[in-house]
Amino acid sequence: MAKATARHILVSDEAKCNELKAQIEGGADFAQVAKDNSSCPSSRQGGDLGSFGPGQMVKEFDTVVFSAPINVVQGPVKTQFGYHLLEVTSRQD
């Protein structure tokens, strides 16, 4: 069964999400940006969501996690919770 590990940053608006993505692409540390900005409890672990399989996250999230390249920040991804930046840290199919 497929499994992935990922980390994310959750914010309430798309503009903030794009701003944070630019900071990370400019060299800012993903984990530190997550700790400073993410509204998800995972922010305490630098946005780390641990390991999970298909169907354990909301559909929009799942689609990205199980198709995006590893270690490339994706987003903004809009879900019912807000806007996410996602980074798949590992995946096994």
Image: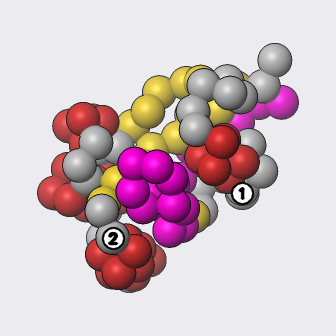
Q: Is residue 3 magenta?
A: no
Q: Main secondary structure of the magenta part?
A: strand
Residue drawn at (45%, 44%) of the image: 7
Q: Amino acid at mark 2?
A: Asp
Mark 2 surroundings: few (<14), some (14-19) or many (≥20) residues within 10 A:
few
Residue drawn at (25%, 53%) of the image: 38
Give the answer, above or below, for where 47 lies relative to 21: above
Q: Is residue 77 magenta?
A: yes
Which label's residue is closer to the chain start, 2 or 1? 2
Residue drawn at (68%, 27%) of the image: 55
The local secondary structure at tag 1 comes to loop
Residue 51 located left or right of residue 90: left
Q: Amino acid at mark 1?
A: Pro
Decide if residue 27 is in sight here: no
Numbered range of the magenta stretch = 75-93
- Name the quarter where the N terminus is drawn: top right
Residue 5 located left or right of residue 32: right
Q: As rendered, which of 78 and 41 lies closer to the eye? A: 78
Decide if residue 15 is in sight here: yes
Give the answer, above or below, for where 49 lies relative to 81: above
Residue 90 circle label: none
Residue drawn at (72%, 57%) of the image: 69
Q: How is the image coloured?
A: secondary structure
Q: Could you tell me residue 93's position as x and y percent?
A: 83, 30
Camera-near label (2 vs 1) is: 2
Q: As rendered, which of 67 and 69 lies closer to the eye? A: 67
Residue 69 circle label: 1
Question: Dot 2 corresponds to which residue?
Answer: 13
Residue 71 located left or right of residue 30: right
Q: Could you tell me residue 12's position as x and y percent?
A: 30, 62
Q: Could you tell me residue 8's position as x and y percent?
A: 42, 49
The local secondary structure at tag 2 comes to loop
